[in-house]
Image: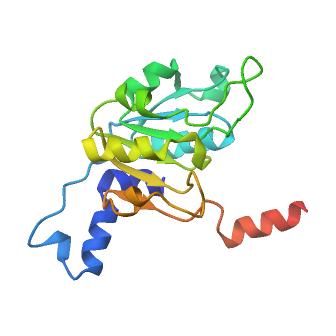
Amino acid sequence: MFLIIGALRNFNAGMQNLRAGKWKGSPEPIALGHDPQGKVLGILGMGGIGRNLKKKAEAFGMSVIYHNRNQLSEELAGGAKYVSFDELLAQSDVLSLNLPLNLTMPPLQKNTRHIISYAEFNKMKKGIIIVNTARGPVLDEEALVMALESGRVTSAGLDVFENEPEIHPGLLRNPNVILVPHMGTWSVEVGYLLFECQ
């Protein structure tokens, strides 16, 4: 949720300006952000993490649609609406990638490397927010940089990268992209859980 809220509110540009000694970007103000309330969150990959994200997003007033390899039971979906992949791209205000990286070739399973690339960005609403906390290679970073530069994508929040630990220079220089170094599980509590599972 941090990356969704941060990308919606344009936190990164504000943080960069503050560190540069500028309050809210003065004398040149930063672009206003958006509230999550009333926005459509599209979740690509509705496993345990996607379902957990759904609950948190609803607490912020977001409506949730999802696409998954298989449609979930009504009980598991918890009120989220199942849509086709193209409908997910067209209807989402925020798209969260929560699917595994699958390099298997069809017909066994769909290859998910670069599942979001140039063609997919062209199907999205202008001004969409992209969040990737899944695996870096599910998102074509070169295509994302172009979508950001063209304005198709307003901002992005990324916790994973295509060629970790290297980060695409176009993402590093873009003030509308929040970048964190694969820190989704970087907490004392998760460390204890991992230790207990060994």
Q: Where is residue 163 in the image (x, y as percent from the top left)?
A: 59, 55
In front of the other: 105 or 191: 105
Choose top left, top right, bottom left or bottom right for residue 190: bottom right
Q: How many labels does the image show?
A: 0
Please name the residue shown 40% across and 57% down the image. 171
In front of the other: 113 or 96: 113
Q: Identify whether 58 is placed above or below 92.
A: below
Outermost right residue: 198
In front of the other: 149 or 175: 149
In the displayed structure, does residue 12 sit left or right of residue 29?
right
Outermost left residue: 27
Please name the residue shown 52% across and 42% down the image. 139
Outermost bottom residue: 21
Image quarter (top left, top right, bottom left or bottom right) of the C terminus: bottom right
Please name the residue shown 43% across and 50% down the image. 4
Choose top left, top right, bottom left or bottom right for residue 40: top left
In the displayed structure, does residue 23 sit left or right of residue 152?
left
Please name the residue shown 44% across and 45% down the image. 142
In the displayed structure, does residue 83 sit left or right of residue 30?
right
Q: Position of residue 174 (x, y in %)?
A: 32, 59
Q: Identify whether 101 is placed above or below 13.
A: above
In the displayed structure, does residue 10 sit left or right of residue 172?
left
In front of the other: 179 or 63: 179
Q: Position of residue 26 (x, y in %)?
A: 12, 72
Q: Position of residue 73 (x, y in %)?
A: 67, 20
Q: Identify whether 149 is placed above or below 111.
A: below
Way the structure is coloured: rainbow
